[in-house]
Image: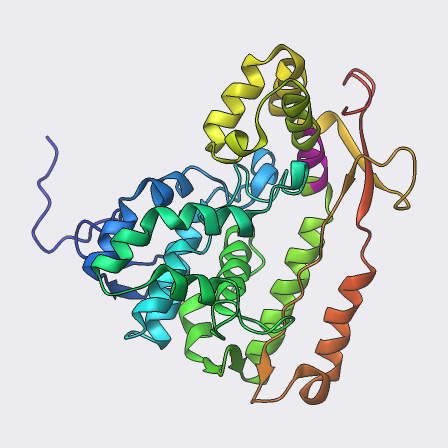
Amino acid sequence: MAQKSSPTAARAANTLGCRGTYTDPLWRITVHLTPLEQQLLTHPLLRRLHFVAHAGASRVVTPQTYSRLEHTLGLLCLVAHWAPQATDLRAAALLHDVGHLPLSHTFEGLAELNHHHLGRQYARQTARLLEQHGLQLHDIERVLDGTQPSPLVGTSGMLNLDHLDSYVRSGRMNGWLTQDPATLLSAMRLNGTTVDTDAATAATLVDLVCAEAHAHVSWENIAPASVVRHAVSALIDDGHQPHALAALTDDELWTLLLDTPATAAVTRRLRETPHLLTARAVPEHHPARTYSLRKIYRSAPLLEGRPLAVAAPQLHTRLAALDTLDRHFAVTWTTGGGGAVC
């Protein structure tokens, strides 16, 4: 017979905010949610993010399974940790990723799809709700597009809270981070819009940034992303509207890919035999190129208030070296896999 839970027993966090609080399992920060935040967490825009993989197509072959909503809630917790009274920043944290496509960045750029532009369009659905709680959509948009300086977006090339959560969450899930995130957090502070810390923590953060960049150019990301990107291109060629595709969840996209004759076979092959894919770096204009990374992220923290180039040149050099990583690839199927991905 199952035992009844005691009133004091720990309960798993839920992503709906219906208990009035949210405790992030990574940072172990408990946020007392405002009525606006509770309503946003039940809004379709936020609910959809629970079904979009933060890691994109690499979700097919890696254990990095958490969702965009988990990252969004982590960002909310970081904002509330350092700026608990900043209701505009807290709302912006919840809305910052609502424009992400299914499988996150995987087919961004096709048909000029851009999650920042889509996010601004989608966020308009919350304008009346924001007004009911004393906030203006325009002010939230200024935070999200960087017009109003904030630790969410920060300064280009410097470590903001959005990227901090991404690097630490990914590092913990992939086994790169062996330290306790809550202990790391205790060594950090905000210096204007940038994360500032001590030498040891700065080195740990640079390790995570480098690990993430190398993961982005690895087979685990490049191979499945290339296949999905070409499959979605085929959907668009088949007459599917890009903006309708962008609004799907991961499950809905997979179902569509499996149900469409032009993409069904390659989608099944990817899901069942991804080990038959190969990826090799090629020059940008190589005729065999099937996939290119749009950018390499390399955000840097401050070290005791100073840029790494001044305070820790060796760490700055490690980050700068990420710009030399290969960004263009040819992805093919090995013998028995069916040839080129496209």
Percent of width and height locating residue 336: 79, 15
Can you say whether 101 is above or below 305 in the image? above
Q: How many marks?
A: 0
Q: Which residue lies furthest to the top in this view?
A: 261
Residue 335: % across, % down: 83, 18
Q: Which residue is drawn at 36% across and 59% down?
A: 137
Q: Position of residue 228 (x, y in %)?
A: 65, 30
Q: In terms of image quadrants, where is residue 80? A: bottom left
Quadrant of image for the C terminus: top right
Work out whether 178 lies above or below 62: below
Which portion, as a residue range, is magenta?
222-227
Give the quarter of the figure containing the N terminus.
top left
Horizontally, is 51 left or right of 43 in the view?
right
- In depth, the one of 228 and 55 nearer the eye is 228
Looking at this view, is 238 or 219 the one in front? Answer: 238
Does 37 appear above or below 251?
A: below
Which residue is pictured at 39% across the width and 68% down the height?
Answer: 78
Residue 20: in magenta span? no
Give the color scheme: rainbow, by chain, secondary structure or one colour. Answer: rainbow
> 40 or 180, which lies in front?
40
Residue 13 visible somewhere in the drawing:
no
- Residue 165 showing in the rendered view: yes
Q: Is the magenta stretch mostly helix, strand or loop?
A: helix
Residue 305 % position (x, y): 56, 89
Point 58% across, 31% down: residue: 242
| Quarter of the figure with residue 263 | top right
